[in-house]
């Protein structure tokens, strides 16, 4: 399932998959989440599962050098979708789209599982003190932004479309770095070490990509 | 660029914001970014956009095969798991002075942390984030006091939680995210009007320029080491 060499991302070739989700489609997932929240609707949950679980598993397989990748992918899928079920009531379409919300849960869950694995393997100083009161919750560090102060739904949708379209036009070396950072759980510094590039080069590739995507621009 | 919160002047660069949104930033540095976000609406917006980018890349992944039994297993689990109640009233408007993560690390009371004194003006409390390569701590600098002159062996991130300080380059205040790279020396001084509280994380231990202080720290660490091993 995983390929050794990664030139760019494993984009799926068929056009259907690459199309930006239409407002209608987004609305459908919002409704599903609302039904899960309101009346624990299994059918709605099944629809969400069907759509998102292949990505969640794929996201798990992206972590390099995993031992027992299959069981890790399985666990990530189970834990992420379980969270989707239990937390559906806190989903707010005014704050995030369904795919962003689910990506965020999968991302946090992956960090959590990887840390637990590292704790298991390294077996020295515990990362978090189990069951202790001052244990820090990952979700306090990677928190859900509940301030809608600057939130502009339309702008959000436009930026999503912008991101989607411009991603396809990025040079391969920029896409490669973005994919490593976002999907393979590597920081800029780790990407630089892996590609044997100076940190500055990795930084500037990301910056060029972000510029093109009209995202964060450093002052 | 619009100045949304004029007092925050130093922001994490694209590298830190991207790694944070991607979840690949080490927890100690991520805590610094999260702390900055607590004070900076501008970066919160950027973080939102960078998370969107992550979601977009995520949705473009080659779908993996999922067996139907996996859904059945999930259904068996959700039958017995309690569901979170909807958040009734969002407390978005009640902005706590300190970020949630810091409050929790301190159990809601900063004084409960184990503070140690370094010189007359500085108190330090280590935070355990399980990051073996970095040392993360809260620093409390007395009003008008200075941090001993020090040189960095690794990179250091400082975020101001309360008050302000200055060094030879500028004056920094609440929310500012300041990065010092390896080899730089500096000597921050807290402003006169109030104590300054900072969160700081460094890649490798600091070298104090003052040899006496270095010996003091060495002795302190010797004394503290067995205790820490037990914890
Ligand atoms: Zn900022």
Image (spheres, coloured by chain):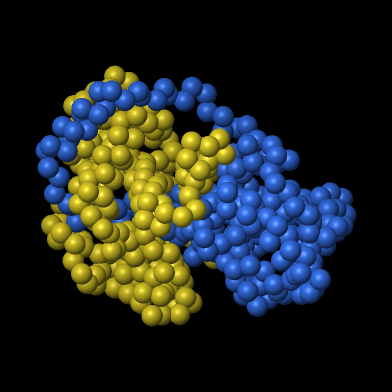
Chain colours: A yellow, B blue
| Residue A140 in sight from this viewpoint | no
Residue at 70% over, 72% down: B207
Res A138 seen here = yes
| Closer-to-camera residue (B93/A55) | A55
Q: Where is residue A82 drawn, in percent x and y? A: 30, 34
For this orientation, the residue located farthest to the top is A39
Task: Please name the residue shown 61% across and 52% down the image.
Answer: B228
Residue B165 placement (x, y as % from top left): 78, 59
Q: In the image, residue B15 lies at what x, y percent?
A: 49, 65
Residue B154, relative to residue A184: is it above or below?
A: below
Report the front residue among B169 and B71. Answer: B71
Task: Pick the residue in front: B129 or B90.
Answer: B129
The residue that appears at 13% across and 49% down in the rendered structure is: B65
Q: Quadrant of residue B79?
A: top left
Give residue A81's position: percent from left, percent from top: 28, 37
Residue A57 sits above or below residue B16 on the image: above
Q: Is residue B122 above or below residue B74?
A: below
Residue at image coords 47%, 59%? B25
Q: Quadrant of the N terminus of chain B?
A: bottom right
Tell me if B181 is positioned left or right of B190 in this view: left
Counting every numbered tag in the picture gives 0
């Amino acid at each position: 399932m995983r390929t050794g060499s990664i030139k760019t991302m494993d984009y799926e070739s068929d056009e259907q998959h690459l199309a930006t989700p239409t407002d209608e489609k987004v609305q459908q997932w919002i409704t599903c989440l609302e039904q899960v929240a309101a009346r624990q609707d299994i059918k709605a949950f099944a629809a969400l599962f069907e759509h998102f679980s292949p990505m969640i598993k794929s996201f798990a397989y992206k972590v390099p050098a995993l031992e027992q990748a299959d069981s890790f992918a399985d666990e990530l899928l189970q834990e992420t979708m379980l969270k989707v079920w239990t937390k559906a009531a806190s989903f707010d379409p005014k704050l995030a789209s369904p795919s962003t919300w689910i990506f965020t849960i999968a991302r946090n869950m992956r960090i959590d599982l990887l840390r637990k694995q590292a704790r298991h393997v390294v077996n020295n100083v515990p990362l978090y003190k189990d069951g202790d009161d001052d244990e820090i919750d990952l979700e306090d560090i990677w928190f859900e932004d509940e301030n809608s102060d600057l939130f502009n739904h339309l702008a959000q949708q436009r930026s999503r479309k912008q991101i989607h379209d411009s991603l396809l036009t990025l040079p391969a070396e920029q896409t490669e770095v973005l994919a490593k950072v976002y999907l393979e759980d590597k920081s800029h510094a780790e990407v630089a070490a892996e590609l044997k590039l100076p940190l500055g080069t990795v930084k500037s590739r990301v910056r060029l990509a972000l510029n093109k995507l009209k995202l964060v621009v450093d002052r | 660029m619009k100045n949304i919160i004029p007092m925050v002047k130093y922001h994490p660069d694209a590298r830190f914001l991207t790694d944070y949104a991607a979840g690949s930033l080490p927890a100690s540095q991520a805590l610094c970014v999260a702390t900055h976000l607590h004070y900076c609406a501008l970066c919160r917006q950027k973080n939102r956009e960078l998370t969107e980018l992550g979601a977009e890349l995520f949705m473009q992944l080659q779908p993996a095969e999922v067996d139907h039994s996996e859904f059945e297993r999930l259904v068996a689990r959700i039958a017995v798991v309690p569901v979170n109640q909807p958040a009734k009233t969002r407390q978005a408007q009640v902005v706590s002075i300190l970020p949630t993560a810091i409050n929790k690390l301190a159990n809601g009371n900063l004084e409960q942390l184990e503070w140690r004194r370094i010189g007359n003006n500085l108190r330090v409390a280590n935070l355990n984030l399980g990051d073996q390569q970095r040392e993360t701590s809260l620093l409390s600098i007395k009003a008008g006091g200075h941090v001993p002159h020090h040189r960095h062996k690794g990179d250091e991130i400082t975020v101001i939680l309360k008050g302000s300080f200055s060094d030879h380059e500028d004056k920094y205040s609440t929310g500012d995210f300041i990065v010092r790279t390896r080899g730089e020396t500096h000597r921050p001084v807290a402003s006169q009007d109030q104590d300054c509280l900072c969160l700081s994380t460094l890649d490798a231990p600091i070298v104090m320029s003052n040899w006496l202080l270095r010996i003091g720290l060495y002795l302190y660490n010797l004394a503290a080491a067995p205790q820490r091993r037990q914890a």
